[in-house]
Image: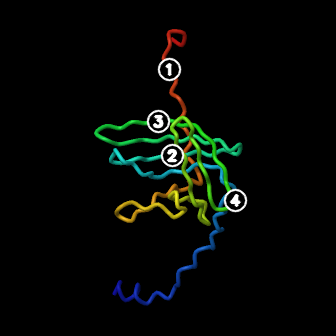
Amino acid sequence: MGLYLVGCNKEEPAPLPALKPVELPKNTAGVYSGRLPCDDCKMRMARMELTEDSSATVVQTIVTDSMKTDTLKGTYAVNGEVLSLSIPDAEMNLKFKRDSLGNMALMTGAGTIYEDADGMKFDMIRILVPMKKPAQPATDSAEGK
């Protein structure tokens, strides 16, 4: 009897309200995260922060038998769809092609999109809402006791 009543319920679910489209930033400054090629390691992950004054900070983690993290400072320039990143201390000059969502794909010296032996691209994905840095815990001191 209960199945009969449930089956005959003519109440239609209300449609979901329309969502506002996500507004993508038009500028290049922001935080990006992704993977970069690596010759002598298992993996090379990078988190890149590009600022309005054209400076760049890249935190890269290189995985071999252990992990090593470096923070590199440099500058960037944008020419159309191409972003050029220069980090003099690491003798690193990279070019990325920006897409319509603001993400970037690593380019080869010939200007094509770089792909590894498995056909994987090296993309830097734009992080639209970067995580906040956790608050530093209060330190115990003799003064506070």
Q: Name the residue under label 1.
A: 139
Quick check: 115 left or right of 48? left
Q: Is mark 3 on a helix, strand or loop?
A: strand
Give the mark, 2 or 1, whose residue is nearer the N terminus. Answer: 2
| Mark 2–mark 4 CB contact (< 8 Å) | no
Quick check: 30 left or right of 143? right
* Disc number for residue 70: 3
Q: What residue type is labelled 2?
A: Arg
| Mark 1–mark 4 CB contact (< 8 Å) | no
How far is the residue under mark 1 from the one under mark 4? 41 Å
* Disc number for residue 61: none
How far is the residue under mark 3 from the one under mark 4? 29 Å
How far is the residue under mark 3 from the one under mark 1? 27 Å
Task: From the image, state whether disc 3 or disc 1 is nearer to you.
Answer: 3
| Mark 2–mark 1 CB contact (< 8 Å) | no
Residue under the point 53% across and 37% down: 72
Foreground of the two, 140 or 110:
110
Please tell me in which quadrant of the rendered image residue 54 appears: top right
Give the mark, 3 or 1, whose residue is nearer the N terminus. Answer: 3
Q: Mark 4 points at which residue?
A: 26
Q: Which amino acid does label 1 sit on?
A: Thr
Give the mark, 3 or 4, whose residue is nearer the N terminus. Answer: 4
Q: What residue type is labelled 4?
A: Lys
Task: From the image, state whether disc 1 or disc 4 is nearer to you.
Answer: 4
